[in-house]
Amino acid sequence: MTAYLQVTGLNKRFGGLQALRDCSFTVGQGRITCLVGPNGAGKTTIFNAITGFLVPDTGHVEFQGRSLDGQSPQQIVHHGIARTFQNLRLFADLTARDNVLAGMQDHVGEGPLGAIFRPFHTARALAAKQDAAMAVLAHVGLQDRASALVRNLSYGEQKLLCIARILATGAELLLLDEPTSGLSGAALTEVMALLRRLQAEGKTLLVVEHNTRVVQQIADDVLFLHHGHLLAHGSPAEIIADPKLAEIYFGGTL
Amino acid sequence: MLWLNLLINGLVWGCALGMVAVSFSLIFATTRFFHVAHAAVYGLGGYVSWSALKHGLPEWAALLVGIVVCGLAGAAIQKLLYERLDRRGATHLVILIASLGLSAVMQNGIAAIYTSNVLQYGLPWGNRTTIIGGALLTNTQMLTVVFGILSYLGAMWFAHRTVLGKRMRAVASNPFLAEITRLQPRQVHIAVMAIGSALVCIPGVLVPLDLGLQPFGGVPILLTATIAVIAGGVGSISGAFVLALVIAVLQNLSLLVMPGEWSIGITFGIFVIFMLFRPRGLFTG
Amino acid sequence: MDFLTTYIVLAEIYVLLGLSTNLLVGIVGIFSVSQAAVFGVGAYLTAFLLMHTALPFPVAVLLAAAFCVGLNILVTLPSLRVSGDYFVVTSFGIQLLATAVFTNWTGGTGGANGLPGVPAPLILGHEFTEPTEFIALTTIGMALGCLCFWLMMRAPFGALLRAIREDELAVAALGKSVLGAKVSAAALAGAFAGSAGGLYATFLSFVDPSSFDLDASIFLLTMVVVGGARTLAGSVLGPFVLLALPQILALIDIPTSIAAAARQLIYGLLLIVFMLFRPQGLLGEKL
Ligand SMILES: Nc1ncnc2c1ncn2[C@@H]1O[C@H](COP(=O)(O)OP(=O)(O)OP(=O)(O)O)[C@@H](O)[C@H]1O
Ligand SMILES: [Mg+2]
């Protein structure tokens, strides 16, 4: 049986730095897989390699049996994979709703000709899309902030909006780069609940996560990355119980 | 031996262009936005020196006055315009538009004062010639070569041997880190603008010695020099100078096969194609 | 010629140019300083077609606009490869290249002397020779341009362009084609500038390089910045304000020898003042 997402032998060098060294792992469908590791371990680099933002020196990525090698970020989304960014990259001068709208894969009215020559059709399509965007916002609990500019949202709201934006693409596999970093209290609980809800709806999640408590609570599988190399994988309990990994993670050297 | 003459003219012109390129390279590598008004500072240098000369100053003093005025102008531009914009979080687009505006103000200010007619320095010694190794060179040309090489060496020495130069390169390589350490990027920016602006006064005087002064003469020269800076790899002083020489020589040799009024067009045509295929410059990874 | 009518006709033509520049610079954030070059190509091409072929005026303008669509896509393409501050150098280069062609290609453009005697537009047997009649043409042109712009900005296309301006990578991560959207925007900007050129050439019945040089490009930019970037209202207001300026200057006693320089100087000053104190212009959004 082929794995849902299969990553094989990824290598990437940045000048003198080996950011990824022979990384291979799989992600199971419908599971929450947490990618953990110290700062600079190469977690974001793996995301970049999977989503076409970076061409690895060697290695392959396969999704549902189809190769993603050499595909652009845009094409990857069409395969049903979407990612968030560690530094959010929201459209700060657009409203929350327009940010979500930008993620919708229905392309009606996104060309100038349609917009100009079929104005009524475009207007109807736009209205329908706006309704759909509102539904997505409601799903993450941001329906009341729909017409607020992103720059006026709180950090927690922005984090939720990042997830809403890629939900709008309809992707099945979501790559979330540190969705809970910088959050605490209610905001943290809210994001964790959302991740579980998404899993219940059938989405597959690959999540970069620093907070071991969060990992313990949400992860089905854990991948432990260090110096660009996959040191271990297993259940959260196994990984956390391993004293060597804890030493790397909290002590910092190897 | 037409081609030999063209080659020599090209090398001389390349030294002038190289000075503009080196001066712009210092600024661009540090501040990272396109300081279009550098073209106007170039023009300013020529006109100030011309005025000083007409007020009876000896040549060297007139040049010195020009250099000082340009240096002060550069520092003032950074302090009063760019730094203010930067403090307000202006995007590069906004800074660029302001720079375009400043360029228009300075150049047209010059045109309003001195008219847009071509002005000549009228220095009799400038056109006297000497034969060096079979080639005929005017005094102006020899001065251009000497100043060109000195400017290049001076800029290299400044960037690699002086404390300010090292700070400049540190700020250029990591503006964010520079901000939180004690490098004081704002002061470094002002200093670099002053030095780059002072340096561009030299070609701003030497080129018009031959061709005469024009208020708007700086723009095509700055753009050609910018091509050298980008093609040579931003931040590389040697790259900028060498590429300036190459472009100038090619422009001159192209006269063998086509009329001169096309050469600037051809240069930019090649540059556009170049940017499509090798946008990071020849000498970078 | 009636001053007020001429003013209105020219301002309406410049509204089309303002839309063109605003679309690229304000909305998509492509820093082009060569829109006057595209404008010029539209003007020369219309003039050439009307003088040397029997094509009717609307067809000539459409052909010129279509050519400018292709041209503008071509000159905007480097912006896909290089970041803003590098592209602007390329864009300057394109503008200088165009000026070199306009001035030196004597066979095609009449060189520095320009092309005199461009015939007046002839539509359905009626010749638009008087400025008062011409107003009808330019008003229709401007209205169509504004309508297109408004429809686009209201549609998802507008939101996409704004998103691209903020973060191209994020747009690509959402499965959208940045290339496609930028090419579309460049095409429209080319169409606006090209048809403005056609109207300009036939209205003045004369084209020469001085209307399409770097100063002209900077003037277009000033229009957009003063009127207000990124909005329809700004693009309409800008030309009317800036073209009124020379008339006001004419009231002040400036020697004619420096009048042109003084005008450019004031445009430059406006750019600086607006960037420092009001980057959103009179009716626009923050740049
Ligand atoms: N485009 C790049 N060019 C050069 N070096 C890079 C590039 N991208 C990442 N790196 C380097 O590769 C290493 C891994 O980076 P990466 O961002 O993947 O780490 P990370 O595990 O996501 O860390 P963090 O927890 O801080 O987000 C780092 O040392 C980083 O500096
Ligand atoms: Mg990371």
Image: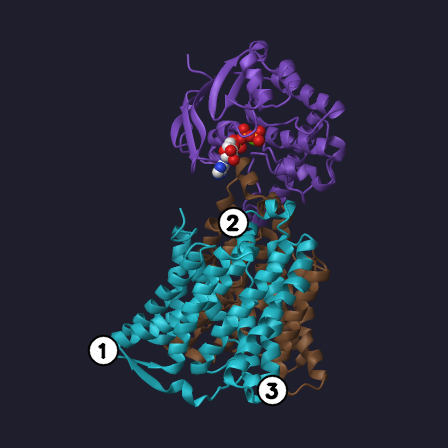
Residue kind at label 1, given as amino acid type: Met
**For residue C48, side relative to residue C36 (left or right):** left
> Which residue type carries mark 2?
Lys
From where the camera sits, is residue B155 visible? Answer: yes
- Between A91 and B76, the one nearer to me in the picture: B76
- Which residue position holds label 1? B1
Q: Position of residue C11 (x, y in %)?
A: 64, 70
Out of C246 and C253, give the one closest to the viewer.
C253
- The residue at which mark 2 appears reads as C182
Asked if labels 1 and 3 share a chain, the reply is: no
Residue mark closest to the camera, 1 vs 3: 1
- Given residues A170 and A107, the one toward you in this image is A170
Residue highlighted by disc 3: C257
Q: SS of the residue at dot 1?
A: loop
Q: Colour of chain B?
A: cyan
| Chain containing mark 3 | C
